[in-house]
Amino acid sequence: MIGISKLYCGTVEPSDALRYGRMSKELPSHLLQFSKDKKPVVVWNMTRQCNLRCVHCYAHAKAALQENELSTAEGKAMLDDLAGMGVPVMLFSGGEPLMRQDLPELAAYAVSKGMRAVISTNGTLITAPIARELKDVGLSYVGISLDGMEAVNDRFRGMDGAFRDALKGIENCQTAGIKVGLRFTINKFNVNEIPALFDLLEERDIPRICFYHLVYAGRGSDLVKDDLTHDETRAAVDLIIDRTRDLFEKGIEKEVLTVDNHADGPYLYLRLLRENSPRAPEVLELLQMNEGNNSGRGIGCISWDGQVHADQFWRHDSFGNVRQRPFSEIWTDLSHPLMARLKDKKRYVTGRCATCRWLDVCGGNFRVRAEAVHGDLWAPDPACYLTDDEIK
């Protein structure tokens, strides 16, 4: 996760994180990515059920209810364990998390245990009463997925009216007083929608947007050929930076992030150097604090059936099941060879990654993408768009 607005527009300084000792339990949410201890943010894909059928769904979500989902009681026991190990954020996802009737109860329980509770949703099921209930239980943030304006989004979501329903969900969250943001997954078919999403951000007074690079997992595995080329990716990242800067120059501060391609960090830093920005040294320090990709260390995933994964895209490898062992034990058990290597994966990457001068900043990028394309999870991430000259 690269905070474009934080880094390029200077809304965060290294001293902001250092003031809290860079410990997860002390840091406010907007500084959590700069923590030193990297206590994992945990994504709980609490259900595989979904009311939509998105073409790039990493979870292969289905309309039918899956019989092996963790129960409410099992979920609460899991949350007890996560709170005990100091997990700072619990991200409830799916499928569509609002398909589970006990989501508000479980979110309230996470908050009562001292965790920040957020949800990732398609937004179509957030009625006004549900938004008020989510506010009442202490939910901190709602991330709503849009993949373009109406025609493009509804094509991706597999349902006419999904865009309108999502906008209504955004309105209901705003009326209830819940912070809400947008999530957008970039690919060839919607990259031209980026300007319209920035316009929507401004028009609807939405404070945050995350632009996700495509990860080749789940139904997204079928879209490898539809990912951007390296040159197209560079152009898209430049556009995101430019539009973020334009907003700030107008006095409109929005939180803009890119996610799932940590080449964005060095790319932004090199752009600052070309622009002779005095912020460049501070940005490099913040990127070093961020440490790049943290799958298996600073982020983890629990599936609807209790399986533990390095992240939400890595479902073909499980480290264990919370029904048999607590997450805290599974996560710290280095007898599993993959878990041990992910805790220090910079030692194991190969090819251009191994000699890249940005390895400490990028963290080796996405291993699951390398595995999907090369059949070798330690090979270079094919989505890294930095040139050989830029990484020397």
Image (spheres, rainbow, N blue to C red):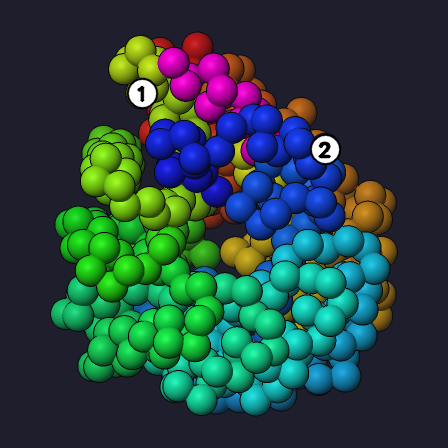
- Which residue position holds label 1? 271
Nearest to the observer: residue 214 or residue 221: 214
Amino acid at the residue labelled 2: Gly
- Residue 243, compared with residue 283, is above or below; it is below
Instruction: Say which residue appears at 61% left-offset and 78% top-offset.
Output: 137
Q: Position of residue 376 (x, y in %)?
A: 54, 38
Q: Is residue 162 visible?
A: no
Instruction: Say which residue appears at 58% left-offset and 32% top-offset.
Output: 16
- Residue 186, compared with residue 243, is above or below; it is below
Residue 227 marker: none
Give the magenta part as a residue range: 278-291
Q: Tell me the quarter of the picture where residue 185 sits.
A: bottom left
Amino acid at the residue labelled 1: Arg
Q: Nearer the viewer, mark 2 or mark 1?
A: 2
- Which residue position holds label 2? 21
Quarter of the rendering occupied by the C terminus = top left
Mark 1 or mark 2, which is nearer the start of the sequence? 2
Does residue 116 show up magenta in the picture? no
Whether residue 189 sits left or right of residue 169 in the image: it is left
Q: Position of residue 112 (x, y in %)?
A: 73, 71
Q: Position of residue 262 (x, y in %)?
A: 46, 35
